[in-house]
Amino acid sequence: MDSMLRKASYVDTIKLLLRNKVYVCIMLSMCSLYFVVTGVQFWMTDYMRVTLGAPPEHAFLAFAILTLTAPTGGVIFGGLMLDKLGGYTSPKAIDYSITNSILAAAVGIPVPFVSFGWVVIL
């Protein structure tokens, strides 16, 4: 495969990557992740101040706490759970990850329809 990549043109290499389902799924997941993270970073304080009417100091404090603790806690807790379930390639771990993804989406969907800040922060 390595010799095939050296001889392949740029377009052929792109086609080869796009045929790799694991690569495509990971890239779509990373794009979604960065889309959400960037949206949170850019819009969260404005949303809390303008839409929810939170004082600026509360909005910035909530933003700081969430952006500092959520990624670290997610990596630590998620890593420990996936290790307990047999590693990231085990069927139990994949089911666990899919279930958590669906639950996270379900919890996030009502946020735009909520008008009081403490629910959004949770």
Image (cartoon, grey):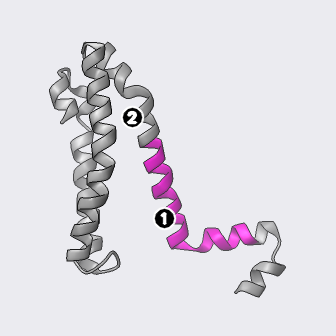
Which is more toward the observer, 65 or 14?
Answer: 65
Dot placed on the residue nearer the N-terminal end, 1 or 2: 1
Q: Which of the labelled discs sits on residue 40, or is there none? A: 2
Viewer can see residue 112: no
Q: Is residue 33 left or right of residue 60?
A: right
* Residue 42: quarter of image: top left
Q: Residue at x 25, y 75 (%)?
A: 83
* Residue 76: quarter of image: bottom left
Q: Residue at x 21, y 43 (%)?
A: 107
* Residue 36: quarter of image: top left
Which is more toward the observer, 67 or 5?
Answer: 67
Number of dots carrying numbers: 2
Report helix, strand or loop for mark 2.
Answer: helix
Report helix, strand or loop for mark 1.
Answer: helix
Q: Amino acid at mark 1?
A: Cys
Task: Find the magenta span and give its range.
Answer: 13-36
Residue 22, placed above or below residue 74: below
Q: Residue at x 81, y 77 (%)?
A: 8
Q: Would you name the residue on which mark 1 appears?
A: 25
Q: Amino acid at mark 2?
A: Val
Residue at mark 1 to residue at mark 2: CA–CA distance: 23 Å
Where is residue 20? Give x, y as percent. 57, 74
Q: Is residue 104 left or right of residue 43?
A: left
